[in-house]
Image (tube, rainbow, N blue to C red):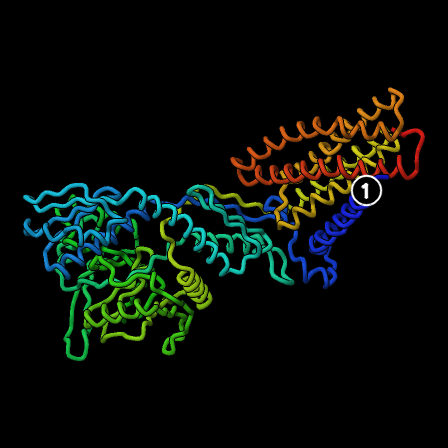
Amino acid sequence: MERNWWWKAIAVFLLTLLSVAYLLPTAGSWGGFAVPKWISERIDAKLNLGLDLQGGIHLVYEVAVDKAVEDKRDRLASDIEDRLTETKKVKVTIERQGRDDIIVKFITPADIKVVDKDFMSDFQSNLDEISRDPAKGELRLRMDEDYVAEVQDYAVRQGVETIRNRVDQFGVAEPSILQKGRDIIIEMPMENFAKGEGEKYDEKKVKKEFERVKRQIGRTAQLEFKICDDENTFMTEVAGKIPADKKAEIKIKTSSFRKGKKGGVAGYTYLESSDRKVLQKFLDSLPSLGLKLPKDREIVMGEAFGKDDKGNDTPDKIWQTYFLISRAGLTGEYITDARVNFNERTSRPEVGLTFDHRGAELFGNISGDNVGKRMAIVLDGKVNSAPVLQERIGGGRAVITLGGMRGATEVQNEARDLAAVLRSGALPAPLRKTFERQVGPTLGQDAVRKGKYAFSIGALFVILFILYYYRGAGLVCDLALILNFLFIMAILAGFGATLTLPGIAGLVLTIGMAVDANVIIYERIREEVALGKTPRASVEAGYSRAFWTIFDAQLTTAIAGFVLLQFGSGPIRGFAVTLLIGILCSIFTGVVVTRLMLDLVVHKFKVKKLSI
């Protein structure tokens, strides 16, 4: 026998032992038995079941990257305005056009000269100067194309990271969160929601948990602190425009608050309605009624609870308006921590916020500069509350109150969820759900059972046919098939892959494909035997002359597998991965392993006639 035969045999033996070791954690997880400690400490990867086998949820979100670009443009516009008005001491108005353009209009046209090379040097990587009109005092700037692409790419990548952080807050085991172009693909297995320890499967509970997770994933979590402009009389003008047929649905309210120990009392007008759509439709119609919002002002709605004659909260939810300065004095990007606390006076849950050093400085400034005014806490475009600033607030801490007439458990869950999304950070751009698929555990179990039957029956027929057709050599082929399956499963488990229903189909196909190599080799050996060659010469000729035929056949299949892997969706990719791994293992077992076994037969046992 060849001297290197033993080394090949030892290598195959060690690979087999290693494959068994890598499959033990998976077998223990599926079979419910304890894996030896010395293995579990060294190997923790295992083969996971896909959503179509164990049940779960598959979501696809599209990231609104253009909104991220618009937000970045608005920040650049605000920075330019601040530098011109505070540093250069010139008066300007800023307009935004389209998605990328900023138009700076100087009240005194001659002041346009302050925007020179030194001024633009801080913005040279972000903005390009498109036009300059000294006569009109008008400057047009546009976001750089490379910078726009960078912002868009960052929005998707940061969206993936933010969603991953949010999902982790739920303790979801083995979620899959992937980026594909501008889409974010999320898969979460049913085991995270189906039941707790000792609990029975509750479909209503699972559906409720699913909805809760989807709410958290898609929540923008954009937190802003804005000052209420209660001294402006614009809302009084708005109240006078309410159509007569809507006055029963939209009510005019006035309120007052104490501005501080020496600040007197301030009053303001606002609208309220129990129907958000009716109130929003009226606000949207203001331009057609001849009312235009003052510069840098906005009307934002907030959810509140109705009051009885004594001023106590009632269970009726209402929507009321807040007239705000549109520019936010502080945003949630400075938050370092968000925790659920309980108010000592009301014993209701609230969310305590902690800001970083810069955030604490900004919060101190906005509160100190607006003592005696209301500061609205705006979350995802809705006012959460609007407390009165009695004094400068230092220390970098703020509180978002929750409650009303809802149950304690509901409010506590809301507080916990809100704290979780604020800790994970705001999404850099809104998400739009484009696809959703939910698979129940019953369908998954049925798929697993049928998949086992399909694989077992297919493998059994192949093994029996090979034994019948190739006799003794067929036994060698069958042993190689078993090792082929073992290697495939071990590689999948080693990479922590997910086995799906298409993946099982790929395994069944691989078993059939694995036989192809042996069929080509065995038929070649038969031809050599028919020519009167010895068993040893026939085996050597069969393998040497059949290799490139086997390689070409497997290569064409591998090319198709790579195409499916590159352009296919989740299930198709699962099939492609299994197929490609199966091709590699089939070539190895069909060419190397069976050659070792036949060499043992013809060299060690020196058979005179091959059973083939």
Return the x and y of residue 207 as percentages of the image width and height. Answer: 52, 52
- Label count reads 1
**Image vertical order of residue 253 relative to residue 552, above or below:** below
What residue is disc 1 on? Answer: 5
The image quarter containing residue 162 is: bottom left
Give residue 294's position: percent from left, percent from top: 14, 53
To which quarter of the image does residue 382 belong? bottom left
Query: Relative to the observer, which residue lies in front, 379 or 186?
Result: 186
Q: Residue at point 15% right, 76% down? A: 263
Q: In which quadrant will I find the C terminus?
A: top right
Q: Position of residue 232 (x, y in %)?
A: 13, 61
Q: Residue 270 vs residue 19: left or right?
A: left
Decide if residue 80 is in sight here. Answer: yes
The kind of residue on which mark 1 rests is Trp
Query: Please, is residue 345 above or below residue 163 in the view?
Result: below
Front-most of 254 and 208? 208
Coordinates of residue 220 in the picture (x, y in percent) = 37, 54
Q: Is 513 on the left or on the right of 561, as rendered? A: right
